[in-house]
Amino acid sequence: MDLNTITLILTIVIGLILLIFILFLIIKAKESQNLKNGYKEIKLGMDEKELIALLGEPTSIGYSNTETKILRWELNESAIRSVFDHDPTRSVWVEIKDEKVIAFDGHNINKSIWT
């Protein structure tokens, strides 16, 4: 192989790596926006099935007692947030009782992914 061929191959490989990274950033930004927008739509008394249709399947499910289910959605954005951000996680938790939302809260919901 001559130098021009090697240079061309390296340029293509680097371009593909950059393209994959940019696509990853776009997907993460979209996930983040979906969680932010979904959080704005959560209402007390909302049906659990409606909530899951809004936010997707939760990252984790737990129980605070035998009657209260806790659903949690969490996005770790450390790959796209600044290296100076010591808390790169965006999350939403929702308490469910009798298949209805009884409480909810968010962490870093309105924080920009670019800070």
Image (cartoon, rainbow, N blue to C red):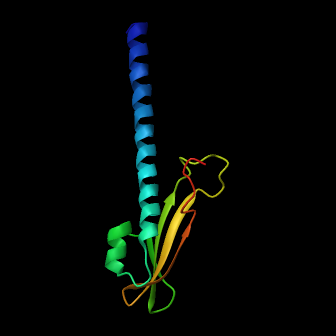
Q: Which image quadrant is residue 43 in? A: bottom left
Residue in front for this viewpoint, 105 or 25? 105
Image vertical order of residue 43 relative to residue 81, above or below: below
- Describe residue 3's horizontal placement relative to residue 90 as left or right: left
Q: Is residue 2 visible?
A: yes
Q: Residue at (43%, 8%) from the top-left corner? A: 3
Where in the figure is residue 35, as x and y percent of width and height? 44, 62
Image vertical order of residue 73 relative to residue 26, above or below: below
Q: Is residue 59 visible?
A: no
Q: How many marks?
A: 0
Which quadrant of the figure contains the N terminus? top left
Image vertical order of residue 74 relative to residue 102, above or below: above
Where in the figure is residue 58, as x and y percent of width and height? 41, 70
Residue in front for this viewpoint, 78 or 13? 78
- Describe residue 82's horizontal placement relative to residue 14 as left or right: right
Q: Residue at (40%, 34%) from the top-left corner? A: 19
Q: Residue at (45%, 39%) from the top-left corner? A: 21
- Describe residue 103's horizontal placement relative to residue 100 as left or right: right
Q: Residue at (46%, 88%) from the top-left corner? A: 68
Where in the figure is residue 95, as x and y percent of width and height? 47, 82
